[in-house]
Amino acid sequence: MTAVADFDLPHDLEAGQPPESRGLARDGVRLLVADGAGLRHAPSRHAPSRHAPSSHAQYRPAQSHHTRFRHARFRDLGQFLSPGDVLVVNTSATIAAAVDGRRPGGAPVTVHFSTSLDDGSWLVELRPPGRATGPVRDASAGERVALPAGAVLTLQAAAGGRLWRAQVAAEGDVREFLSASGRPISYAYLAGSWPLTAYQTVFARDPGSAEMPSAGRPFSTELVTRLAVGGVVIAPVTLHTGVSSLEAGEPPLREWCRVPGPTAGLVSHARAAGHRIIAVGTTVTRALETRAAPDGTVTAGQGWTDLVLGTGRPARAVDGIVTGWHAPGASHLSLLAAVAGPDLVSDAYAEAIRHRYLWHEFGDSCLLLR
């Protein structure tokens, strides 16, 4: 098996526009279900003798692969979940985090506002204007960038990799400034510009993510209703994402997250009862695992997380993950392997390329079940 991150992504598999622009509903994107246990509602590893077949169980035919796959539409997600499973979602809302500016001397630049820090400063990334594929490399501490509406951004210190800690002088709150002068962060693979509403999920309540927690995008209100009626428990956490344009090998950023008491209780109770915990996205996984004890019990809390999940630190509380498709070399791939194992993830990515699934935030989806 090759490394999870070692694959070639054909350019034509990069989704360049939202599915709505391709004639699909949000929940009409494709869903690859990859289940190392064989696409069946197997007895839980937490309570091996609890589950006997019932009228609720939906068994899947065995496949020829050692890893079994099913190809579906996202609206079919409920077919692969059981009553009592807990689906944990991220309530963070996407902010308009990209702003045009001018460097000293008048050269144009795009500022990506990544993370709001406790002291009022921000982590930011400077990028060339237009659809650049990398950061500005010649910035220096003390540089002042002129922003719209008379605002000024001052670089204070490099913050590792491509990010800078910066102070923003703007009239009123910085988030209000971004709402008035910013736009959603977008990248070179996108064909066109899309409004902020295209970057919000149905769960979005708490503004703070520089980029959309995109695993939740395919959910519709109708699908959420069907899942709830079918006995799937939906529980919230919040994690505000930073910029995801990290280069290959760069670790994930520190991010702020909150696991509410009711969610921690639901997760721990469901695990004890033998039900599965399904995280909607890498953001939810990181939040839950930050608060997970070695036995998988989750406690409530909030604050900054620098947790890096991988084969050396596998998931403790999360049994499966709903996720989009990540670019080669992305740190998200190690997190997926921490949940489902590197073999399952590698096989799923090969299957997705073979069947021409679409990548990135407006692409198709995957449900990985270990």
Image: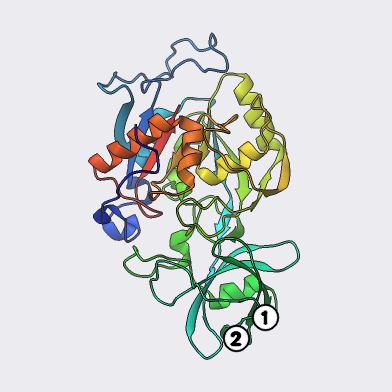
Pointer 2 with pointer 1, Cβ within 8 A: yes
* Residue displayed at 54% across by 64% down: 162
* Residue displayed at 46% across by 47% down: 215
Q: Is residue 367 above or below residue 95?
A: above
Could you say which is closer to the camera, residue 157 or residue 168?
157
Q: Position of residue 152 (x, y in %)?
A: 64, 83
Q: Position of residue 230 (x, y in %)?
A: 47, 29
Q: Quadrant of residue 323?
A: top left
Label 1: how many residues lie within 10 Å, few (<14), some (14-19) or many (20+)?
Answer: some
Q: Quadrant of residue 181?
A: bottom right
Q: Position of residue 343 (x, y in %)?
A: 39, 30
Q: Hey, what amino acid is under mark 2?
A: Ala
Secondary structure beneath dot 2 equals helix
Horizontal relation, residue 26 to residue 354: left or right: right
* Residue displayed at 29% across by 45% down: 357
On-image quarter of the C terminus: top left
Judging by the rendered image, the residue that carries numbered circle 1 is 170
Q: Given the current orientation, which residue lies at the most extreme right position? A: 119
Judging by the rendered image, the residue that carries numbered circle 2 is 149
Q: Is residue 256 above or below residue 31?
A: below
Q: Position of residue 186 (x, y in %)?
A: 43, 66
On-image quarter of the N terminus: top left
Label 2: how many residues lie within 10 Å, few (<14), some (14-19) or many (20+)?
Answer: few
Horizontal relation, residue 180 to residue 118: left or right: left
Q: Hey, what amino acid is under mark 1?
A: Ala
Indicate which disc, 2 or 1, sits on the residue closer to the N terminus.
2
* Residue displayed at 63% across by 73% down: 176
Q: CA distance from mark 2 to mark 1?
A: 8 Å
Secondary structure beneath dot 1 equals loop
